[in-house]
Amino acid sequence: MRAYDRHAIEVRHVPGLILMENAGRGAADVLGRLRPLPGLDVVLVCGAGNNGGDGFVVARHLLARGARPHVFLTGSSEQVMGDARVNLDAYIDLGGLFTQIDTEPLLPSLQRALAGAPLVVDAVFGTGLARPIQGLLAAVVGAINEATGLVVALDLPSGLDADTGMPLGVCVRAHHTVTFGHYKVGLFTPEGARLAGQVQAVDLGVPDTIVQHTGQSAELIEEADLRSWISPREANAHKHQVGGVLVLAGSPGKTGAALLAARGALRAGAGLCTLATWPECVPVLEARLPEVMTVPLDPTQLDALLGRQRVVVLGPGLGLDERARAVVERVVLRWEGVTVLDADALAPFAGRPEALASAPGRLILTPHSGEMGRLLGVSAAEVERDRFGAARAVASRGRCTVVLKGARSLIASAGALWINPTGNPALAAAGSGDSLAGIIGALACALQPLRAAAAGVFLHGMAADQWRLRSGADRGLLASEISDEIPALLGSLTAVR
């Protein structure tokens, strides 16, 4: 975004003052949709930089729309320069209420104002923050977090690292974030999503062709992408044509994982699904899902079983013993079809993702942060500190597609990084990942691995969003219910228009 702004100003000759005006006006529009503005008391906490400048523009627009804004500047007015200074002076000269908070003894006046404000705007720090917040500014952030009103952050919650989504010391906890121009990747990590609340981007009044010159860090998956990838089936489609999925999964005590993966594959459109599991598990599974064929998993007969398949889903509940490891390595390192590696199938490659590179382009990995950490030889906490770097690293070293699961799952492959915006806390349920593996496997029968992974993650999250919309709950979703939502979602995407 720094390059984007610089290109707009220096090459396209769009004054920075106009970019700031468009950002602030767009944010004021969002505030007007969140709360009726006439007569509304609004506290705006602004820094001395350009994020504060955006806040001054918002305050002026609120004043013009009948609200009663009160700007608190976290510093001295002499520190405010350039475009931000122009907008601060305009706000003050129009009669806007203004208080300077540049020493600790002045902090209680901010705290009193925040205590009674129904709407609070955080405009202290934006994308320029590169160090932990300390001292008076940390106390200001703490005061914002104690406010009882609706908190809306401008561009980013103050204290959030725009690139990693991790807090730099303390961080504002916002209910909503209005970000400018384009989304920042830090808003799409589990921690960033928690701190940012509902995120909305407002445009800066310049064409998006600028991105062609500046590039981007990642892409956000949208429903329009799935519409372009997933086509209605021809009238003469049959089960062998649309593709079969082989699920190699399950072990004593973990047969549910195998069933959930198989159910996900069938609900997402697999024409056939064969579930191969250890012989002692077959009697348990045969009567549970009549649409699935079950066969005993015999490593000596694996080649014959694989020869009839288009896609393999490997690992859910399979086990971690030597026989499971032998099956995983045989499929991953010697079979030539598309394989979704989930759960136990990831364990044999701990600390050595390069071993996956012998099957370039045909593997889809679906780790959570703990499994990703084991692949890279680091802790789950280290993965969470830089999810984007971790996903890129495994995708590059393993020459594969990687789905790093979590709030705002990431999909990475060589040269691509996509972010999934769908899903909610109801997905924090046992078996959710098993269903996802099956869904991706079915989609991989028709789509190349990167798109299959992206579409599967999007649909999986969308299913949870639909369930939450009906139930009003953020918990209690069963993993099997996720799969059962998929046909209707696919129908809405492929309906003739």
Image: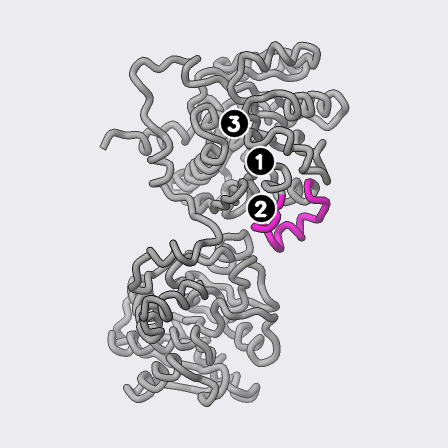
Q: Amino acid at mark 2?
A: Arg
**Contact (CB < 8 A) between labels 2 and 1?**
no
Q: Left or right: 364 with respect to 149? A: right
Which residue does the numbered mark 2 point to in the structure image?
392
The x, y position of residue 421, in whole percent, is 44, 47
> How many tags in the picture?
3
Q: For residue 414: magenta?
A: no
Out of 317 and 18, give the one closest to the viewer: 18
Q: Quadrant of the C terminus?
A: top left
Gap in Å between the C-alphas at discs 3 and 1?
A: 18 Å
Q: Amino acid at mark 3?
A: Gly
Q: Secondary structure at mark 3?
A: helix
The x, y position of residue 214, in whole percent, is 42, 58
Q: Which residues are magenta?
A: 375-393
Gap in Å between the C-alphas at discs 2 and 1?
A: 10 Å
288 in relation to 407, above or below: above
Which residue does the numbered mark 3 point to in the structure image?
438
Which residue does the numbered mark 1 point to in the structure image?
400
Residue 183 can be seen, yes or no: yes
Please, which residue is most extreme toward the front here? 11
Q: For residue 381: magenta?
A: yes
Q: Quadrant of residue 286?
A: top right
Residue 58 can be seen, yes or no: no
Q: Secondary structure at mark 1?
A: loop
Give the residue drawn at x 48%, y 88%: 76
Q: Quadrant of residue 52?
A: bottom left
Q: Which mark lies nearer to you, 2 or 3?
A: 2
Q: Earlier in the sequence, mark 2 or mark 3?
A: 2
Q: Amino acid at mark 1?
A: Cys
